[in-house]
Image: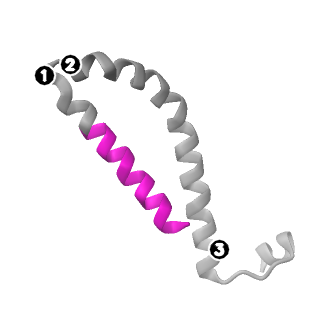
Amino acid sequence: ARETARTGVKLTQRDFVLGLIEQALAEAEASLAPQEGPESTEEAPEDNGAAGTTPDASEASTEAERGTADIEQ
C-alpha cells in the first residue's frame, strides 16, 4: 500500500520483489565495476605464466553473474 502511494502504480508482490532484486544487482555491479578495471591490467602478464587458472576462475564467476542478470531482465 505504501509503494502504491509513493509511486502511484499498483505492484504485485512479485513485481515489487523483482524490482528490489534488480536494484540490488545494479548496485552490486556498480560497486564491482571500479574494482574490475585494475584487475584487467594485471591479468595480461599472468596469462603467460602458470597462474593462468586464477584469472579464468574470476572470469567464469563474472560470466555467471552476467548470465544471472540476463535471466532476470
Secondary structure under tag 1 reads helix
Quadrant of res 20:
bottom right
Q: Amino acid at mark 1?
A: Ala
Residue 63 on the magenta span: yes
Q: Which residue is mark 3?
A: 16
Quarter occupied by the N terminus: bottom right
As measured in the structure, the alpha-carbon distance from the residue carrying label 3 to the one carrying label 2 is 47 Å
Quarter occupied by the C terminus: bottom right
Q: Earlier in the sequence, mark 3 or mark 2?
A: 3
Q: Amino acid at mark 2?
A: Asn
- Image check: 57 left or right of 28? left
Secondary structure under tag 3 reads helix
Question: Magenta residues, as a range?
Answer: 57-73
Q: Earlier in the sequence, mark 3 or mark 1?
A: 3
Task: Tell me the residue at 58%/61% (across/down).
Answer: 22
Q: Which residue is mark 2?
A: 48
Task: Tell me the residue at 44%/53% (across/down).
Answer: 66
Q: Which residue is mark 1?
A: 50
Residue 14 at x, y = what percent? 58, 80
